[in-house]
Image (tube, rainbow, N blue to C red):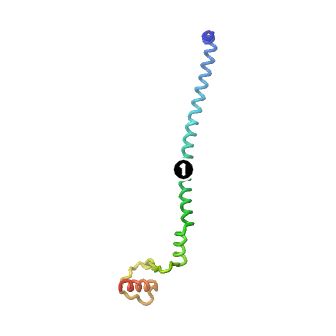
Amino acid sequence: MFSRILNKKIVTAVLIAVFGLLAASLTKVYPEADKLSREGELFQAKIDQINLESKKTEKLTEYYKSEAYLEKQAKLRFNFKRPGENVVFVYGDTYNQSPVVGDVPEKGASPMLAGVLEWFRKLFR
């Protein structure tokens, strides 16, 4: 009975048309599915990057809350020191001249340069 139905030309034509429509719809759906898959991978990469940045931010926040950071900031901003601790300030050379130990600064020279030279004299005594 089933073979008689398949032997009819109209049924064969309808089946061919249905398979043709299925094949056509698959050719339209597959490229879009591939495109969505690639977009999903890009979004996953962005999510991974954001998670990494979030972890870095959490570590930085923990550091900012730590005692070590507070102590460092107190020393840098407010010149605090621990009892018994000696503090030495080293300033950069603003005049592009390196001071030579033993040179006497000229009148009108920078007071910072005079302080640095005095520090060198005391250091190498």
Q: Which of 108 and 124 is in front in this view?
A: 124
Q: Residue furthest bottom?
A: 107
- Label 1: few (<14), some or many (≥20) within 10 Å? few
Task: Name the residue rendered at 54%, 46% in the picture.
Answer: 42
Task: Name the residue rendered at 38%, 86% in the picture.
Answer: 121
Task: Label 1, secondary structure: give it.
Answer: helix
Q: Which of 105 and 58 is in front in this view?
A: 58
Coordinates of residue 61 in the picture (x, y in percent)? 56, 63
Depicted 14 relative to depicted 44: above or below: above
Quarter of the image with the C terminus in it: bottom left
Coordinates of residue 123 in the picture (x, y in percent)? 38, 83
Coordinates of residue 90 in the picture (x, y in percent)? 44, 78
The amino acid pointed to by label 1 is Asp
| Residue 68 shown left or right of residue 95 in the figure | right
| Residue 120 shown left or right of residue 38 in the figure | left
Quarter of the image with the N terminus in it: top right
Image-quadrant location for residue 103 = bottom left
Depicted 6 relative to depicted 28: above or below: above
Image-quadrant location for residue 119 = bottom left
Count every numbered label the image shows and give the total: 1
Residue at the disc numbered 1: 48
Depicted 62 relative to depicted 107: above or below: above
